[in-house]
Amino acid sequence: MGTFTIERDGDLLTVVVDGQLVVGNRAEFKQLVFDEIEAGARRVLIDFSNTGYIDSSGLGALVSLGKRVREQGGALRLAGLNDDLRTLFELTRLDTLFQLHGSRADALAGF
Amino acid sequence: MGPAPMRSPDSDPSPFADAASRFEWSVASDVREIDPIVSTITRACVDAGFPDQACRLNVPVALTEAMANAIMRGNEGDVSRSMRVCARIDDAMLCVEVTDEGAGFDAEAARAMCQDPEWLEREDGRGVFLMYALMDKVEMWCDAGHTVRLVLRRK
């Protein structure tokens, strides 16, 4: 399915999604990031460079995380989406809700 | 349009007869059952020469949505209920039927949710929309349970 690796540098949280972000692991993903936001993360970067696909549950989890971090005065950015994943965000118009960046370096610029 | 019709579409004979590749599962309503089934069907699509994007995106996402709906909505997350999945691949198409023990739902209403201004910021409500967006044909009906049929034609 998918696994998550987190890196924390001050208030910057980076989460790398390896594999899928889907109904079977979205609860684990959400809790992981919510806990980090609770612990002070305010800049949240999700790196999808190693991600296969995301289903509607995964997309929904991202929407919730975006809301939560904004409520705390922070921001969420997404990086490393391939053409397939971008297609999903465009179909669901979530490309208008999130900042999508080609690479982690692009996402970190000015973050 | 209301809830799913009460029988299989008459005009379409069983899509699983004489299939080149055919798969069938009957599993408990547990989301952990989804991934192995998706992997098997997707791998079969790769082997059968379906386009790359269909194998990377359309097939796995639409199948995941159909099964997640069956488990969490149709069977209400009750692991004592079962989900049946039948798939076939032939020269023309991939056809998958996912059947749960529920009474079905109003697919048109679910699709129309994407017109709601608040849809963008909702956590749920994208699954049915994605099935229709990623497949060539989606049909639903109620018979002995509720069935969703997904069809993706070879391009």
Image (spheres, helix red, strand yellow):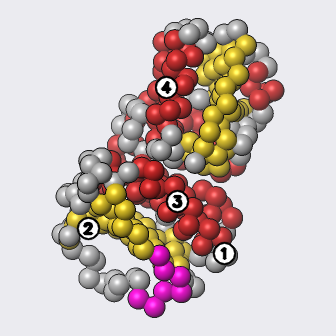
Q: In the image, which is nearer the foreground, mark 2 or mark 4? A: 4
The secondary structure type at the circle numbered 2 is strand
> Quadrant of the rendered structure where residue B16 is?
bottom left
Dot 1: chain letter? B
Residue situated in front as seen by the camera: A12 or B10 = A12
Q: Residue at position x 73%, y 13% from top?
A: A9
Name the quarter where the C terminus of chain A is drawn. Answer: top right
The answer to whether residue B109 shows anywhere in this view is no
Mark 2–mark 4 Cα distance, whole angstroms, equals: 36 Å
Q: In the image, which is nearer the foreground, mark 3 or mark 1? A: 3
Q: Which mark is residue B47?
A: 1
> Quadrant of the rendered structure where residue A98 is?
top right
Compared with residue A63, is residue B147 higher up or lower down, i.e. above or below?
below
Same chain letter for marks 3 and 4: no
Which percent across, then down, holds residue A13?
A: 66, 19
Q: Residue furthest bottom?
A: B18
Image marks 3 and 4: residues in contact by CB distance under 8 Å: no
Which percent across, then down, holds residue B23?
A: 47, 76
Near mark 4 (Cα within 10 A), the count class, few <14, some 14-19 or many ≥20, is few
Q: Earlier in the sequence, mark 3 or mark 2?
A: 3
Q: Mark 3 highlights which residue? A: B36
Mark 2–mark 1 Cα distance, whole angstroms, equals: 30 Å
Image marks 2 and 1: residues in contact by CB distance under 8 Å: no
Residue A68 vs residue B148: left or right?
A: right
Mark 1–mark 4 Cα distance, whole angstroms, equals: 37 Å
Q: Mark 2 highlights which residue? A: B141
What is the three-letter code of the residue carrying label 1? Asp
Mark 3–mark 2 Cα distance, whole angstroms, equals: 25 Å
Near mark 3 (Cα within 10 A), the count class, few <14, some 14-19 or many ≥20, is few
Identify the magenta region. Answer: B17-23
Q: Mark 4 highlights which residue? A: A31
